[in-house]
Image (cartoon, grey):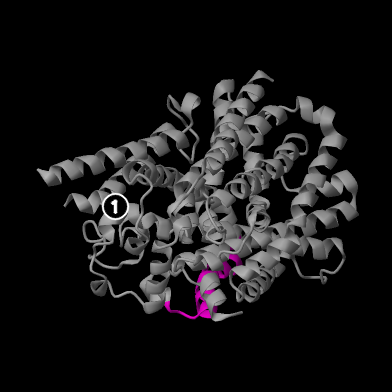
Amino acid sequence: MRRRFTETADQDRKEPREAQRLPPELERRIDVLEGDAAARRDFDPRSWLWLILLGVVLPVVLLILGWSL
Amino acid sequence: MSRQQSIADESAWPLLPAERNWGSWRLAIALATAAAATWCYLIGEYVGYYLGFLRGAAALSAGCMIGMLLVFLAAGPVCARYGVDSIASTKPQLGTRGWVVAAVMQLVSIIGWNSLLLIFFAKSATQLLSVLGLLPEGISGRQIVPGATFFACTLIYVALLRGATGVAIISKILVAHVLIGLWMLWLLLSHRWPELAVAKPALARPDPLWNYTTGVELGISATLSWWPYVGAMIRMAPDARRAVLPVMLGMGAPVPLLSLIGLAGVLVLKSSDPAEWLRAVGGTRYAILALVFVGAANFGTATAGIYSSAIGLRNFASMERMPWSMLLLVTIAPVALVGILIPELFFAKFGTFLAFIGVGFAPLCGIQIADYFVLRRRRVSIRGIYTPGSRGPYAYTYGFNPCALVALIVGCAIYVVLLNPLSFDSRGPYEYATASLPATLGAGLVYLVASRFAGRAARG
């Protein structure tokens, strides 16, 4: 039952496909995406740098500046 | 439009790499057009009740960037990796039926926001007719607003018949309104800076920290409610990395900038609506420009909103195969009905509606972030997202994940305990932490603990 809560992609692929009855076009899309290397990546180090700069550092600086006014 | 492009634009199925052809600029423009609308004035107006201009600008900008980060970390990775919308991105957490909770939140949120925008659009159009002397005698604005709302809905319907391509075309045309908005801000600052610098907020409380935190909170909660838009737009981008700057700068930055119009307006002219104060500052010509700006801003945002909502509805099995034109009608109809039948009543009750919408998205973001980055360690099954019923990996218990639902309830409770969204009565540690951030963090932690506990219990 643990798999119900913390299933992973590797385990997911073991599901019997014939039982899932997806439309053929959707099935094709999923197959393509499962084999697409780009779909396995999200943020690279540069992305994280921008996210931290714009979403954390900038707000902190703004808050300090604003409070000091 | 080719069949492939049509599927890409009009379905909630995952998009293939070749179909995700929005570059960084195109995405940034679409997001900026979606974010910059009349609600910016309202956001600025509320901040202006508690804070002066400079401190308000800092708090609001910080809040918006924090909120944008949360939204992007929540929905962004899955939406950008697999080309799915925000609703589909909740299936790993909420379950194959539980995602309906997020869908209802999205639908109510978008209907509410877009009803507001289109009513504003209609009011601006009516004012414009009046200023230009084109309003027939004996006909009041109240009579024109329903017709103008219907007209706006029709225009949006026609534009969106082309799917996301329609959104992109509208965005290219209407993004100019962001620049006009910045010009209006400069106009106000240059004409009224001495007054603005010393203006006192009308409802400021004795505790300056509380006022400051409330400014941040308003920024966070406003951007959190754009969770549906982010997914629907960034699924058109090739990958997550190329979506980072468009989201953070294209959507996160214009909002506080344009909100400054409302902030400055309410502080020195007691009105956040530039259509009202620009006539006082610059005469009829400026008023006409402002009204055109307001109309364009709201029209662009409403177009993106209706599109996001329609894509979200595609996740329902009954609407999966519905013709796009029919789905658009189903999506626009509630917005049109509110705008045509009860525009004034909706305006009167809008604050209540908005307050409760904001409460739900903070916990949802917390659950998604915890699930993706901690629990699943960035591994999500695209097949599982689209496997219906009880056979898929995200079926949980009858299609619902109890851990996520409990975490969602706890997160909402944390928010409401810290800050009553109707009265703005607060309890510590609100002044130090806001309400959105503890709600996000609390929901995420409860989700993780509950999921781990459920896993161990199940293993025996």
Is B458 contained in the magenta span? no
**Residue B390 on image: x %, y %:** 23, 65
**Residue B16 on image: x %, y %:** 49, 67
Tell me if residue B202 can be seen.
no
Q: In the image shown, does B365 or B423 lie closer to the viewer? A: B365
Q: Which region of the structure is painted magenta? A: B321-343
Tell me if residue B309 can be seen.
yes
For the stretch drawn in magenta, the main secondary structure is helix
Q: Quadrant of residue B439?
A: top left
Q: Is residue B274 left or right of residue B43?
A: right
Q: Is residue B254 above or below residue B432?
A: below
Specify the amino acid type for callout 1.
Answer: Thr
Q: In the image shown, does B81 or B142 lie closer to the viewer? A: B81
Mark 1 sits on what residue?
A8
Q: Chain of mark 1?
A: A
Residue at 84% over, 34% down: B192
Residue at 31% over, 55% down: A9
